[in-house]
């Protein structure tokens, strides 16, 4: 998506060789127009997959997941993040480390909103090491639902998350692939 790449170049702040700050369009502020276009693009790519539910993890995935779900005419379900002290039988839960925050959180989805009949499209904002994605994929597997694909706005392809998902045979679509942040410069893969 050329418009997205242009915005990333204009507004992204390279924090280190590993981390790109995208607060202006993904992680703090949301541009509704651009977000709806991202949703349209994901909906177009997954139109034939028979999606019954879009799933993301709070918080930064919600806006683009909403746009995608709106375009596909299906509900959006977002996994909650919290510290769980006791196992809750009606919740599917996975513990995941967070790359940027340096902490471990639990992501949870209620069994009430996901079933074995579902065809799930997982949407998220950024993929780095893929820990959050791995946790969510495990939850979807345990629910018995089918994961028909994953859509991520920004893939940092110098980190292993995206490749790990593709290597599992899961269809992954990304809107911008960043190959390198070396020397403070954003280099796209294509
Ligand atoms: P992931 O690849 O599955 O996202 O897991 P990882 O553990 O690598 O990343 C954890 C969190 O860090 C994610 O946000 C992810 O979007 C964010 N992140 C990783 N690299 C970057 C980066 O270069 N720039 C920015 N802005 N974020 C990055 P999260 O924990 O899901 O938090 P939230 O944004 O949804 O609240
Ligand atoms: Na996220
Ligand atoms: Na994020």
Image (spheres, rainbow, N blue to C red):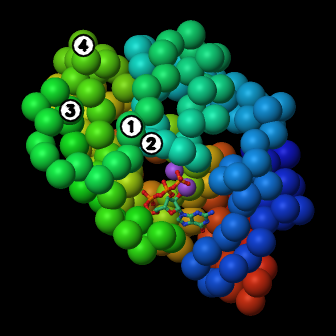
Mark 4 = which residue? 117
Q: Earlier in the sequence, mark 1 or mark 3?
A: 1
* Circle 2: element type: strand
The front one of 20 and 72 is 20
Position of the C terminus by quadrant: bottom right
Mark 3 against mark 4, which lies toward the viewer?
3
Mark 2 against mark 4, which lies toward the viewer?
2
Locate residue 120 relative to residue 15 in the image: left or right.
left
Quick check: can you spot residue 123? yes
- Quadrant containing ligand 3 reads bottom right
Q: Picture coordinates of residue 57 (x, y %)?
A: 44, 42
Which quadrant of the figure has residue 14?
Answer: bottom right
Q: Earlier in the sequence, mark 4 or mark 1?
A: 1
The front one of 67 and 160 is 67
- Label 1 and label 3: CA atoms lie apart by 10 Å
Mark 3 = which residue? 91
Mark 2 = which residue? 57
Q: Quick one: label 1, few (<14), some, or many (20+) residues within 10 Å? A: many
Q: Earlier in the sequence, mark 2 or mark 4?
A: 2
Q: Do residues under tags 2 and 1 come within 8 Å of each other at their CB atoms?
A: yes
The front one of 78 and 150 is 78
| The residue positioned farthest toward the front in the image shown | 85
- Label 3 and label 4: CA atoms lie apart by 18 Å
Label of residue 92 in the image: none
Mark 2 against mark 3, which lies toward the viewer?
3
Q: Is mark 2 within 8 Å of ligand 2?
A: yes
Q: Picture coordinates of residue 146 (x, y %)?
A: 27, 26
Mark 1 = which residue? 79
């Amino acid at each position: 998506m050329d418009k997205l790449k242009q915005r990333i170049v204009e507004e992204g702040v390279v924090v280190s060789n590993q981390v790109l700050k995208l607060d202006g369009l993904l992680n703090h502020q949301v541009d509704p127009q651009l977000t709806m276009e991202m949703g349209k693009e994901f909906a177009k790519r997954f139109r034939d997959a028979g999606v019954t539910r879009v799933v993301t993890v709070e918080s930064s995935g919600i806006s683009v997941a909403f746009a995608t779900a709106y375009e596909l005419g299906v509900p959006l379900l977002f996994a909650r993040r919290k510290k769980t002290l006791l196992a809750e039988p009606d919740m599917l839960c996975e513990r995941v480390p967070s790359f940027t925050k340096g902490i471990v959180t639990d992501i949870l989805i209620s069994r009430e909103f996901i079933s074995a009949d579902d065809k799930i499209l997982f949407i998220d904002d950024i993929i780095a090491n893929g820990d959050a994605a791995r946790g969510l994929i495990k939850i979807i597997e345990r629910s018995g639902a089918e994961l028909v694909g994953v859509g991520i706005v920004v893939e940092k392809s110098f980190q292993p998350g995206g490749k790990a998902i593709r290597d599992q045979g899961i269809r992954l679509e990304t809107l911008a692939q960043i190959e390198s942040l070396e020397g403070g410069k954003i280099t796209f893969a294509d």
